[in-house]
Amino acid sequence: MPRLPTSLLRKARAIDPLLPRLLGVCRELRAAQNELRWLREYADKIARGRSGKAHRTLLRGMVENRASGKPLQYIVGTEYFGDLEIKCRPGVLIPRQETAASVTHLTHLLRSAQGLPDELRVLDLCTGTGCIPLLFKHEFSDAPHPVRLRLLGIDLSQEALDLAKQNLERLQEPDVDDESSVINFLQADVLKESWDEQTVERPCIQAALNFSRQPQFWDVLISNPPYISPSGYWTTTTRSVRGFEPKLALVPPASEGATDTDQGDTFYPRLLTIASECEAKIILLEVADMKQALRVANLARRLNTCTGIEIWRDQPDQKSGTEHQDGFPVIGTGNARSVLCWRGPGAAWLGKEDELNVMGAATDMPLSLQPQFTYPFVESSEDSRSSYLEDRTMHNHRPRGAYKLFEAGRQLVSQDSKKK
Amino acid sequence: MTSTTTPWICRGCLVRLARRPARHHVRFLTQTAAPESMPPALVARARAIAADHKQLTDKLSQGFDARAAKRVGEFSSILHALQKWDQANESVAELTSLIHDPTTDAELRELAADDLEASRTALADASQSLTTSLVPVHPFAHLPCLIEIRPGAGGSEAAIFAGDLLRMYQAFCNRNHVRNTLLKYENTNGTQEGGVPLSEAILEVASDGAYGIFRCEAGVHRVQRVPVTETKGRTHTSAASVLVLPSVEERSLGEEDVEDPESDYYIDPKEVKTEIMRARGAGGQHVNTTESAVRLTHLPTSISVSMQDSRSQPKNKEKAWRLLRSRLAQLRREKREEDMTAMRRSVVGVAKMGRGDKVRTYNWGQQRVTDHRSGTTVHDLDDVMAGGQTLDKVMESVRGWLMEKDVEALLAEESLTKK
């Protein structure tokens, strides 16, 4: 990192004596001025009614804290995610604006869609602060056609889930009739297969869904999983991220024999499997860069469960020229940020029905297009839309397989309580 | 031989003399009502509009387009008039060919001659209505208007007369049930008190189309009478100026109509470039930046707005949009005001404040009102000053004159574009 010129520091000091301290982390005078203003506003808020000296001490403390690299979001306690102010706390990843841009763009595509189901189900894996389901609901609150939403955020960390629930309470408008949409948060281990040993703290997703009587089938799957490889963690992340944000949310766990890159991509095969198990029609996965985006897109193409794959950049809502990478359309401006896959009615919801899709040109897909059901009693039909309707009716009577799992979960709990 | 002897005239000459007046008379009529009286430029314009109309109706049959529908509505009256004119023209041509044909018998020829008179008047009517429909409606004719009255040359007598004019227009509005409010009234003492000579008055006529009605009143109105302030009984000539302005302010749209393309505040999102400033580098989970600045650039005017107040990027964006909207609206308002001043100047240019360039004279001694533009003279001065029907008559004549002027201008413009 280049040394800050003395002239800049002098200039900053002339504006405000606290500014030079912030320049170290902000690197730019304009950014430092903004941060100081926000810190001052926050100090004004919490030190209201106290003496000027207390206020000054408080502000100086916060500036020192910030200068040590602590993210402003942790000091102030909130971060804006789209239009929402989300509560942040050390130990839980701070929501990123790029994620908000992708989610907002997706909701804007879906809001005006025709033929959405009566209840749109959205599953968010590795939810963290719960920002994605909350923003999703918020963006749908003024949709042209009211849609009932069922949103579920899943995370491994209890700390994150507590914070997510707090955020839900904070943003729940008490006077609005919330019959129309439901948000829940569940603890589960996304990486755990259903045949692995289950524990109450870390059940697999299927068991967790069954245990909490959540549906097995979801329309939209969104995830911002840990995606940084161990080497990337030391080279590409900023000091503030390394020093203060949880590594759990950034770097996937190590597994035997996996290369550095593979470890970074650990979550994606599992996420795509879950997506096909829960019959997701739209899948939005955040990635680190174009290389990872292409790896994930190629993986999805190999799995052959999606009819269309797109790569979105940081601002997918901004039109750019038609660009293709490896045969995948790339949308928006900025860094490659997420991979969008769709299939079945998802194409119609996104308005991509008439577009020539990548998969269709490459392979003949009739078999692969058929929904893959985990439970043998559902007959797969040729028309994905009719199978989708079947799936809708399925929700009413609980599938037998799910019931078994549910029973298993209950036994686990009873065993656990006996131990105690 | 007496001195009163008439000179000898040959019989043939006498016969010709006897016939000539009759023939002259007939020729005179043919000249006024002949089809040639319709200027070819106007006919060509009407034909072009008819072609346009056909195209537009074809377009409308495929799908509805608000703008096309509006234009079709505007053109339909022209089309109708053109059809009538064509019919009348045809019948006249047919009848004349019948008369000139040596094979037609005398009785039929007589009948045709009778019919010819009727169809010629019909043709004249059709020409008139076609001309009227072709003359462009004044762009502000549909608007409400402001009438400003100020005394001109002539001292306090002019001020008294200005007050008389104001009362005349108020009475005219009341008689015609047109909503009017006095926006400003100031007498020569600088107070609002009535009865004292007027120094400035602004009358707002709030009904739609008022500008079309009162447009003809703009100019210098001259008065010739023995003023009440005169002690020696001499007749004075004074003047008051009348300004008629379309009132656009009431119709300008506010900030709430952001979606309305007519509004000052409307911006086509396609014309705006949005830039989001972020920290350099990988982004995403790698960086926890607090950058939230947004910069918008309106490409046609290259006005740029950047906003970084809030930590929330959408909020900054929203604020930037609001700022950009108000900046552009300001720009548009300024431009419109400039146009208005230009128009106002042109109006005032017509109404120079001297006694010479008068548009109308009110003569008390002869109880006469003469409009110098249309050349109309009426003698019921009291009815005019009371805003009665005689004033209607005068205004109607001026509107006719204005229309004639407009047709002339249109023709001049058309011949100019032809070249």
Image: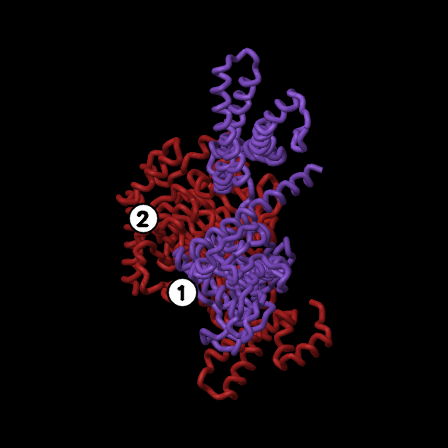
> Which mark's residue is nearer the viewer, 1 or 2?
1
Q: Are marks 1 and 2 on the same chain?
A: yes
Q: Pick the residue in front: A128 or A56.
A: A56
Q: Is A319 above or below relative to A355?
A: below
Residue at 52 percent across and 82 percent down: it is A58
Residue under pointer 2: A405
Label 2: state its secondary structure: helix
Q: Earlier in the sequence, mark 1 or mark 2?
A: 1
Please state, as top left, top right, bottom left or bottom right, where the N terminus of chain B lies in the image: top right
Q: In the picture, one chain is red; tell me its letter.
A: A
Q: Position of residue B57 (x, y in %)?
A: 49, 33
Q: Pick the residue in front: A366 or B406.
A: B406
Label 1: state its secondary structure: helix
Q: Position of residue B148 (x, y in %)?
A: 53, 64
| Dot 1 alpha-carbon crowd within 10 angstroms: few under 14, some 14 to 19, many 20 or more | many
Q: Chain of mark 2?
A: A
The color chain B is rendered in: purple
Q: Chain of mark 1?
A: A
Please state, as top left, top right, bottom left or bottom right, where the C terminus of chain B lies in the image: top right
Q: Position of residue B114 (x, y in %)?
A: 48, 24
Q: Position of residue A216 (x, y in %)?
A: 35, 47
Report the residue that reaches farthest toward the top. B103
Say the numbered circle drawn on residue B113: none
| Dot 2 alpha-carbon crowd within 10 angstroms: few under 14, some 14 to 19, many 20 or more | some
Residue at 52 percent across and 49 percent down: it is B397
Q: Amino acid at mark 2?
A: Leu
Say the numbered circle drawn on residue A167: 1
Residue at 70 percent across and 72 percent down: it is A4
